Amino acid sequence: MRVRIAAATVVALLLGGCSADGDDPAPAVLSPSASPSVAPSFAPGAAGAGDPYFPTYGNGGYDVAGYDLALRFDPGSGRLDGTATITATATQDLSRLNLDLATLTASKVTVDGRAATSRAERNELVITPAAGIARGAAFTIVVAYGGIPQPLENETLGVGGWQRTKDGAFALGQPESASSWFPVNDHPSDKATWKLAMTVPDGVEAISNGVPGERTTAGGWTTWRWAEADPMASYLATVVIGQYRVTTTTHAGKPMVVALPESLPATGPAAKSLALTGEIADFLATQFGPYPFDAYGGVVIDDTKVGYALETQSRPVYGNVFFTSGTNASVVAHELAHQWYGDSVALERWQDIWLNEGFATYAEWLWAEHEGERTTDQAFDAAYQGFDWRVPTGDPGADQLFGEAVYQRGAMVVHALRRTIGDEAFAGLLKSWAADHKDGNATTDEFIAAAQKASGQDLSGFFREWLRTKAQPKHP
């Protein structure tokens, strides 16, 4: 909608409009919500999403709708080049904004087709558009960038992000990974859709999230295309490049893409484990509700740097360490459960990671019971005996983000809740929680409210004991 402004007002705005820090121009652009007589007060977006555990992760001032990456990777040189097109909406009147970009260099930045100034500042790309962006306005950033990406190192949580291999590379890690290979608002509170066109030499595979698209070849290079239409937290974005056997089938009317490295046997334990993906996903759907995404699958990485598995959206990635002793359905159940709890329903802040890992660990217990192994009661009792309760599940601290208080005690919280509210209310809660927060973010307080609504009980004491205390909770 066009708004007519009095000439005197325009002159005053042009002479006096400046951002809070005095560095950036504050053009006379009205936000959609502003009255004709009040100019917006343009200011820089925050250089952080405000997470108590990781204050520098992510950024403020805007909400990303989608990432569209067109990249080219040369395994020989290790160089990655391309463009990132980012669509977003301003959540404040922006004079400038930050994207997380840790190890690569931007060569050109535009905002809505106009050249923008940019500078690298530690692990941030600071962008000043040619004109201020009004709150509520949609805008598009295009960043041309490149270099040799490097891993991200966290003193307590280890190495993540982009890592080279003898025949390619992979991007993987938690709680941060994405900023090592593309400009991003790198915090799970800002989920966005995803498109990737990765060009690699002919004969090299490039596997990513979501639905596979058209694959094209020209001049000795092949472009692999992937798209994830459901919003995704940035750390769940992945690409795996190298010598892989890629098998695409259909399960429940959706593509199932499985990739195994050529270094592993085609019918070995890793292959047999991933072959259970459809069966396990179908079982979990009986517990949690419909599978939330448009594709299934999994990738195995045969590299000593990957001693973990990660729930990368629609296509979990597994280190081969999980399959060295034989078929391992438990880890597959864990990562597939995350597609509901952790991916579709993502955390709002890292302190609440038990909402991801507690439910995924409990899914291991459910699958074992389904297979006629130990019951969920037996799994709970085994975990309860001799457990170290000194770390509270609801606030483990950044250095214990992947500790037993999050995984095992988290699963015990889930089962203790089941015993407290009864099987019927619990079964309804599992499905309603996943449905009500599909494609969104959620907090522990919201889960407590949902549990109380499902059960009709005041559960404040229960959750205080099981999530907040450093002492052994009463056996339910």
Image: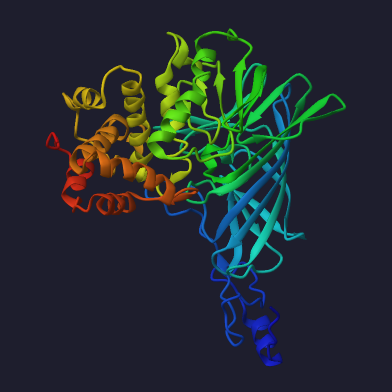
**x and y percent of residue 221 in the render?**
81, 26
For residue 232, above or below residue 218:
below
**x and y percent of residue 281 in the render?**
47, 29
Residue drawn at (59%, 51%), measured in percent from left and top?
A: 99
Please say which color scheme the image uses: rainbow
The residue nearer to you, when weighing 84 against 462, is: 462
Q: Quadrant of residue 474?
A: top left
From this viewpoint, which residue is outermost toward the right? 219
Can residue 168 be spotted in the picture? yes
The residue nearer to you, when weighing 144 against 241, is: 241
38 vs 380, left or right, is right
The residue nearer to you, when weighing 467 against 179, is: 467
For residue 262, above or below residue 40:
above
330 vs 251, left or right, is left
Residue drawn at (64%, 16%), measured in percent from left and top?
A: 166
Q: How many marks overall? A: 0
154 vs 238, left or right, is left
Can residue 305 be spotted in the picture? no
**x and y percent of residue 56 in the render?**
47, 49
**x and y percent of residue 330 in the render?**
39, 21
Residue drawn at (38%, 35%), measured in percent from left and top?
A: 287
The residue nearer to you, when weighing 69 against 298, is: 298
Q: Quadrant of the C terminus?
A: top left
From this viewpoint, which residue is outermost toward the left? 474
